[in-house]
Image (tube, grey):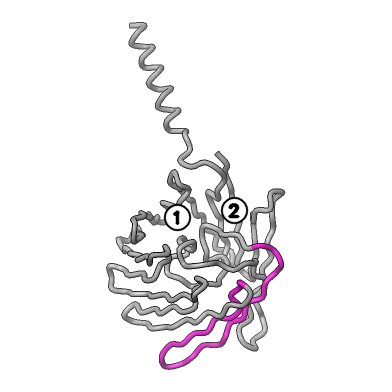
Amino acid sequence: MKLLNLCLILFVFLSACKKDKPEFEGCAAVSMQTDVLSDTKLETYYYDEHKKLKRVRFSNGEISISYNQNSIETRLSTNIVFTSKLDNRGRIISDESNTGALYTYEYSPDSYLVKEVMNDGKNYQILNYTWINGNMIEKNRNYGYAVGVPEQVMYSNKAYQQLPNGLVYNLLEVVNPYLLDYYGKMPANLPTEIKYGDFPGNHPYEFQMDDQGRIVSAENGGYSFALNYECH
C-alpha cells in the first residue's frame, strides 16, 4: 500500500511539472485587452517551443496557426481556413481561403510590402504602400471604380516593436495581422499619427512603456489596448 501511495504521489508530481513547464524560453506578450469605444475584448496568446504564435483565444472563439516549410495555415473557429504561401525568402506572397477569397502581395527589392491586391469575390481593392527611410509613409487605395483618400503616416524616433496583433498600428492591412513577421520588413520606428488626406481628426498614437522599454499600453483616438507579458 505504501508503495502504491508513493507511486501515486510521484505520478501527480511529475504530471504537475510537465504541465507547468513553459513551451518557450524568454519573454513574450501573453494577452492583450482592447477597448474600442467602451467595447472591451481580451485576446490570449499561446506559443510553440520556437516562440511562434500557435493559437489566439478570444471570448467567442479562437484561431490556430500551423507552420509548414512553404506555407502557413490559419484555422478560424468558424471553419474558415487561410493558407498563406511563402516565397523562397519566407515572405507571404498570397493568402487564400477555403471560401475562395484571394489576397496577393508584392515586395520591393529590399523586402518592403509595396502592393496588396484583395479579392474576396464581392469586393476588390488594391493597396499601394510608399516607404522612405525604412518607414511606410503613405497608403493609397484603388477600388477599381474609384480611388481612396491618401493616408499619410508620421513617426516618432522610437524603435518599432512587433506586437502579436498587428492591427493595433493600423498600418499594413494584411489578411492575417498575427503573422506580420512574414509580410516583409516592418517600419523602423513607432507611428505617431495617421492623416487621412486633408480631413481633420487625425489618429494620434500615445504609447506607454515599462521599465524594460516594452510597450504595455497605447491609445489611438477611441481605441486603446493594454498588454501583459510573461517571462520563462
- Secondary structure, mark 1, is strand
User: Disc 1 marks which residue?
Assistant: 58
User: Which secondary structure is most common in the magenta stretch?
Assistant: strand
Tag shown at residue 155 = none
CA gap, disc 2 and disc 1: 15 Å
Can you name the residue that lies furthest to the bottom here?
145
- Secondary structure, mark 2, is strand
232 up-or-down from 198: above or below: above
- Asked if residue 192 lies left or right of residue 230, the reply is right
- Asked if the magenta segment contains residue 137, the reply would be yes
Quadrant of the image occupied by residue 194: bottom right
- Asked if the magenta segment contains residue 151, the reply would be yes
Point out residue 93 in the picture as x, y percentages from the top left corner.
Answer: 39, 71
Q: Quadrant of the C terminus?
A: top right
Front-most of residues 115 and 122: 115
Magenta segment boundaries in residue numbering? 134-159
Quadrant of the image occupied by residue 83: bottom left
Point out residue 188 in the picture as x, y percentages from the top left corner.
Answer: 62, 67
Front-most of residues 229 and 106: 106
Q: Quadrant of the N terminus?
A: top left
The amino acid type, in three-letter code, at marker 2 is: Leu
User: Disc 2 marks which residue?
Assistant: 227
Point out residue 62 in the picture as x, y percentages from the top left corner.
Answer: 40, 55
Q: Are marks 2 and 1 in contact (CB under 8 Å)?
A: no
Q: What residue appears at the point 61 percent right and 72 percent down from the top-left corner?
A: 134
- Asked if residue 50 lies left or right of residue 212, the reply is left
The amino acid type, in three-letter code, at marker 1 is: Phe
Quadrant of the image occupied by residue 130: bottom right
